[in-house]
Image (cartoon, helix red, strand yellow):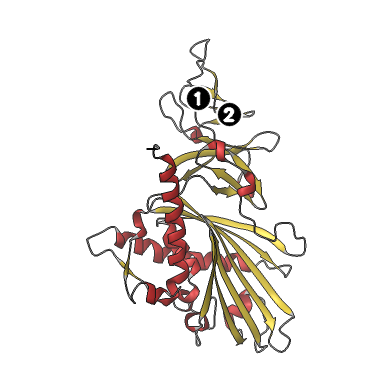
Amino acid sequence: MNVQSSHEGNHALTNPAFQPYPRNCWYVAAGRAELGRDLLARELLGERIVLYRKENGEPVALQDRCPHRGYPLSKSELIGDQIQCGYHGMAFNPGGQCTHIPSQDNVVKAMRTKAYPLAEKWLWTWIWMGDPELADPSLIPSCGYEDTTEYQSRFIGCVPIKANYQMLIDNLLDPTHASFLHKGGLDNDDKSELGTTAARVEQDGPMVRQVMEVKNFDPQGIVAQAFQLEEGFLLNRTLINMLQAPCFVNVITTFTDAAHPDRIVSEIIASIPIVPAGIGRCYHFVATSTSQRGFEGLGPHLLHLIDQDVVALEAIQAASEVGADAFEMSVRSDETGVRARRILIGMVEEEQRALQPAE
C-alpha cells in the first residue's frame, strides 16, 4: 500500500490525541528490574495500579485503591506479602482480598480490590488489563532473541510522556525524523541519511515493520562514538522499525562490512514497549541487546534521544488539544505508522463488537 495514493496525497488523518486502546492483550507494566519490595505506583490504560514482589519474588499487581475510602495502596506499607492501608490499617493479600480490618472482627468478601494477571518474560513484567479469563501468557509478543546468551542485554529505564501512545508509536516507526529532531545523533548531521533513504513496509497480521537500508555508511562523530564504530570504515546499515501490536516496538540496527556484507560489525536491538497511561499520557520503556560487550555509553545516548522526543511529542499533544485546527496530514514516510494506527483501531473495534449483545 502506498500512503500517498491511498490517502490522495496529503490527506488529513484522524487526530489520535483521544484514540482508545485495546484491553484484551498484554502490556508491559514495568521492567523486571523495577519491581522489588518497594510499592511501585503506575497508571495503565486509565487505571491506577500498585506493583510489588512477594517475599518469594513473585510479582503482584493490584488496583491502587483501598475500597474503604479510596486511599492509594501505593502510599501504604508492605508487610510480608500483604499491603496494609496507610489510612485505616486494612490489610489486602496478593489476590486483592481484605484479610483484616482493625476496627472489627469480621471481613466481608466484598471488601477487596482488583488484582491483575501478570507474567514475566525476558526483561519485562507484563500485565493483562482486560478480561482475566482471556489472559494467556502464550500471547505475549516474542522478541526473537530472549534466550540468546551471545548478546548483552540490559533494561535502560521508563520515561513517562504527556502524549498519546499512538503519537509515540508513529515516532518510532518513522526514522526519517531522526535526521532533524536528533540531528547528528543517529546519522551524520551533514548527510541526513535516515531522512532521505527510501524504505519498504511489510505487514503480517498485528505486526508491521519498516526496513531501511543505507549503503556505504561512513559513521562520524557522535554516531561513531555511540555505536562504537570506526570512522572512515564504510558500512552497510540496515534499520528495522517494527511494531507487534498493541505495544511492543523493536528498533534493530545492523552494521555490516560494506566490502564483506555477510560480516556483522555491530548489531543493536532496542526493545521499546509503548504503554498508554491514560488519554494523552504514556510510558516509553526501553531495553537494549547488543552484539558488543561493554556498551555502557549506549544507554545514556538513547535516553538523551528520548528526551528530545519527549519535548517534541508533548508540544504536539498540547497543540492537538487546542482549537478546531488540530489535524494531521500524511506523507509517504508515514505508511508504517498509518498501518499501525489501523491495526490498533481494528483491535479496539473487534473488542467493542464482542461486547455487543447478539441480535
Horizontal placement of 145 versus 9: left or right? right
Q: Amino acid at mark 2?
A: Gly
Residue shown at 75% from the left, 60% from the top: 148
Query: Would you say 149 lies left or right of 283 here?
Result: right
Q: Residues within 10 Å of mark 1 (few under 14, many from 20)?
A: many
Q: Nearer the viewer, residue 285 or 175?
A: 175
Local crowd size for mark 2, using a 10 Å CA cut-off: few (<14), some (14–19), many (≥20): some
Residue at far right of view: 149
**Tag shown at residue 112:** 1
Q: Give the image location of residue 336, x and y in percent.
A: 48, 69
Question: Residue 182: x, y in percent?
Answer: 48, 74
Whether residue 144 is visible: yes
Q: What amino acid does circle 1 point to?
A: Arg
Question: Residue at the location (73% across, 64% down)?
Answer: 151
Q: Indicate the secondary structure of the residue bearing disc 1.
A: loop
Instruction: Report which residue position mark 2 lands on.
Output: 95
